[in-house]
Structure formats: C-alpha cells, structure tokens
Image (spheres, helix red, strand yellow):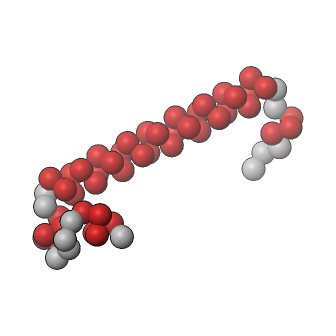
Amino acid sequence: MSDTRLLSTDELLRGIVDEVTEIRIREHSVMQKIAELDRRGAAAELGYKDVPHVLR
C-alpha cells in the first residue's frame, strides 16, 4: 500500500474515485453472471433450491 500521506488531496480523492469505479464495474460483472446463472436454471441443474443456495 502506498503512503497516502505523500499524496495531494486531489490525488487522494481521484484514487478513491478510481478504486470505487473499479469495484462497481466488477460488481456489475458479477451480477450479470449471477443473472445468467438464474436464466439458465443453474440451481435446478446443480440440484439446489435456488441461486442463492448455489452461491453459498
């Protein structure tokens, strides 16, 4: 982890925004994949009650 004390306030804020953006992009990708599992009926195919049980 970098020493954030050396960053300007603008740089620190930009870094936070960049990281949150990356997190949201990854979360969206995961949600799309989960939705596709649901559309495919993966739970029944794999012997589970529903998709949340598959993911546990």
Image location of residue 40, percent across then percent down: 13, 57
**Can you say whether 32 is above or below 47 in the image?**
above
Q: Residue at x 21, y 57 (%)?
A: 37
Compared across the picture, whether 28 is left or right of 48 comes to right
Single out the residue that lies furthest toward the bottom: 47
Q: Is residue 4 left or right of residue 15?
A: right
Residue 1, position in %: x, y? 75, 50
Q: Residue furthest top?
A: 10
Identity of the residue drawn at 59% across and 33% down: 18
Furthest-right residue in this view:
6
Q: Is residue 16 left or right of residue 55?
A: right
* Residue shown at 59% from the left, 38% from the top: 19
Quadrant assignment, res 45: bottom left
Q: Quadrant of the C terminus?
A: bottom left
| Residue 1 left/right relative to 14 | right
Name above or below for residue 41 compared with residue 25: below
Total marks shown come to 0
Q: Residue at x 37, y 42 (%)?
A: 28
Q: Quadrant of residue 6?
A: top right
